[in-house]
Image (spheres, rainbow, N blue to C red):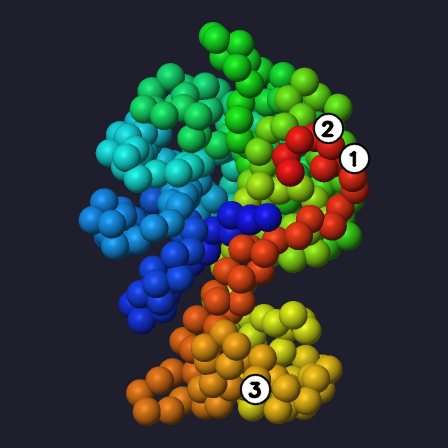
Amino acid sequence: MGFDLYFAGAVIEEVTDYLKELGVCKLFSQLTERRDINSWADAMRKGEISSKLFVDSGAYTAHTKGALLDVDEYIEYINSLDDVLTLFAQVDHIPGKFGVPRSRQDILEAPKKSWENYLYMRKRVTSPHKLIPIFHQDEPFEWLHNMLEWRDEEGKPIPYIGISSSKDKASKHREDWYWKVFSIIQKSSNPNVKTHAFGTSSVKHLELFPFTSADSTSWIQTAVHGSIETDFGTITVSGVQENSKKHIKHCPISFEALKEYVKSFGFELDNLIYDTDGRKAYAERMKFNAAYLKRWADNYEYKGPKSFINRGLF
């Protein structure tokens, strides 16, 4: 069974070309990556890429800069991509001011404004079924109930929603929140709604909960920090971090076995460790991580509760 893992994050052209060859699902932020979106969309129209395209509003990035997004301009841009777009995120409202502790009032007001934005956008976009409303951790669960019980003028429910956990919370707290979220979904009148995990790279969470899709930049971050993602966990191959417990010298399999494992993805281990003949090791690690996660997504195996499976998602 497959899983739609959307690769996010800006990378050098060499890595982008490799992603196109792999045929990965791709997520871009319209706020900072329009040139890349347009290039990817043109390649899709020409039949050069066979993949799924997800565009994010960039609301959080705008929030960090103290800026507001022009919702109408975003809608116009989204509609220009309708022929190639798979999904796009609503303009969600981020509570408070960046760098300033959020008040309780900020947190309570944010989901109301986000929902108003969703309804506003839904009336104006070409394909409202592609529009993803987003429920954030710390928001009152009444807003999740609202998404699940809402119906359009034809009596149809929202087909796809976004679930965004707080990145500043410990993994266990995010996991506990996911349990609550999916318990509510299961008991709702819309139990088969598709779900997208925003910014979640935890394979454990993605296998434990029945998400339909997710996006992540971890494949880039891991590579930049000298590591690769494998079936044996994250392995640091760069000599810069030899003291790390995840370093290759502590690998649970032999060096020779790891070389063969890497080769099964079409890579040479040495090229992931050293810069050679114009090859940058960090770029090779990015490509390897993309290949590994693409294989994981293509062979996705749900390992969570059977009660969630009974929702009819699988």
Q: Which residue is mark 3?
A: 259
The residue lying at 58 percent from left, 37 percent from top is 195
Q: Nearer the viewer, mark 2 or mark 1?
A: 1
Image height of 311 relative to 239, above or below: above
Q: Amino acid at mark 1?
A: Ser
Mark 1 residue crowding within 10 angstroms, few (<14) / some (14–19) / many (20+): few
| Percent of width and height locating residue 200 | 59, 52
Mark 2 or mark 3, which has the lower sequence index? Answer: 2
Task: Tell me which corner region of the image, top left, top right, bottom left or bottom right, holds residue 101.
Answer: top right
| Percent of width and height locating residue 265 | 50, 74
Element assignment for label 2: helix
| Mark 2 to mark 1 CA distance (whole Å) | 8 Å
| Mark 2 to mark 3 CA distance (whole Å) | 44 Å
| Tags 2 and 1 touching, CB below 8 Å | yes
Mark 3 residue crowding within 10 angstroms, few (<14) / some (14–19) / many (20+): some
Q: Is residue 42 visible?
A: no
Q: Which residue is mark 2?
A: 186
